[in-house]
Image (cartoon, rainbow, N blue to C red):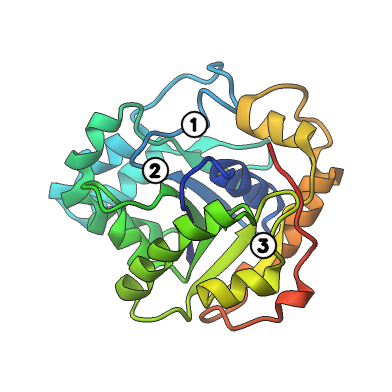
């Protein structure tokens, strides 16, 4: 199946919240993989510490020296349920940023294991930096890499060099896209012109649902009908199209709004 990577220019624009919302509206089996070298958030956030911690990504990395079959088997063993459907799961990330450099040698094996799954993988890769431990193999192998950002000048300035980094890594911008998560700011067409990357859409304002996904605040019941998930489902369909991302009219994007 396919791997879809989400990255951030920094400034906490809501990458993990977006990844979870995408998974909860995905049309088929899906795995949310926390590949952020700055640490995973789901166990302490959405589950508020009520789900037993597993080795997660670190456990998978430990098997990298034993070959592809061992890595894939360990990945399956480390998955935790995201909901009661049995179709949506997640792989917990590291819990200490000092562990990130040690993952560098394991990322190619982890990326190959993702690609071998019978479910699509949404990889939350966090802030894209030049530091050691970045999941470069996951980004390189992804069907699409999506920059999650707010439509502000500060975020556009931070995104520009990172889009350039990704363009060099991927050999072009065909697999790159942008999702907007913010209030008033620059129009999608302006961001496309500044970054040279298609805007896939924007996440509607729904602070209550965002708080459930990011911090486990409130009830998870009936999330599917809430504005955040309805808006994200449109973006998921755009990401799930076969082949590289193609240029889309920025004017067709969902109006930008804020996510907290």
Q: CA distance from mark 1 to mark 3?
A: 21 Å
- Can you identify the residue that label 1 sits on? 41
Residues at marks 1 and 2, CA–CA distance in whole angstroms: 9 Å
Q: Quadrant of the C terminus?
A: top right
Mark 1 or mark 3: whose residue is earlier in sequence: 1
Q: Residue furthest front?
A: 153
How many labels sit on residues? 3
Q: Label 3 crowding class (10 Å Cα cut-off): few <14, some 14-19, many 20+? A: some
Q: Position of residue 185 (x, y in %)?
A: 71, 56
Question: Image point 13% across, 48% down: which residue?
Answer: 65
**Can you say whether 37 is above or below 27 in the image?**
above
Q: State the separation of the CA atoms marked 3 and 2.
A: 20 Å
Element at badge 3? helix
The residue beneath circle 3 is 236
Residue 242: x, y in percent? 57, 79
Q: Which mark is residue 112?
A: none
**Disc 1, SS:** loop
Pointer 1: residues within 10 angstroms few (<14), some, or many (20+)?
A: many
Q: Tell me what residue is drawn at x 70 percent, y 42 percent.
A: 259
Tag 2 residue: 36
Residue 236: give x, y in percent of width and height.
Answer: 67, 62
Does 52 appear above or below 166?
Answer: above
């Amino acid at each position: 199946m396919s791997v879809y990577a989400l990255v951030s220019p920094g400034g906490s624009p809501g990458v993990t919240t977006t990844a979870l919302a995408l998974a909860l509206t995905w049309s088929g089996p899906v795995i949310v993989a926390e590949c952020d070298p700055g640490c995973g958030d789901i166990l302490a956030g959405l589950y508020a510490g009520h789900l037993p911690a597993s080795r997660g990504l670190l456990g998978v990395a430990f098997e990298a020296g034993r070959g592809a079959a061992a890595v894939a088997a360990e990945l399956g063993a480390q998955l935790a349920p995201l909901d009661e459907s049995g179709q949506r799961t997640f792989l917990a990330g590291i819990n200490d940023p000092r562990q990130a450099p040690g993952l560098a040698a394991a990322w190619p094996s982890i990326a190959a294991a993702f690609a071998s799954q019978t479910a699509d993988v949404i990889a939350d890769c966090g802030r894209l930096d030049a530091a050691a431990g970045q999941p470069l193999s996951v980004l390189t192998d992804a069907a699409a890499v999506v920059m999650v950002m707010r439509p502000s000048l500060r975020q556009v300035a931070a995104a520009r060099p990172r889009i350039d980094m990704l363009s060099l890594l991927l050999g072009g911008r065909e697999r790159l896209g942008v999702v907007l998560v913010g209030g008033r700011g620059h129009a999608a067409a302006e961001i496309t012109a500044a970054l040279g990357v298609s805007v896939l859409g924007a996440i509607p304002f729904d602070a209550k649902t965002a708080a459930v996904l990011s911090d486990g605040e409130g009830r998870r019941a009936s999330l599917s009908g809430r504005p955040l998930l309805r808006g994200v489902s449109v973006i998921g369909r755009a990401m799930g199209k076969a082949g590289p991302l193609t240029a889309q009219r920025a004017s067709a994007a969902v109006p930008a709004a804020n996510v907290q």
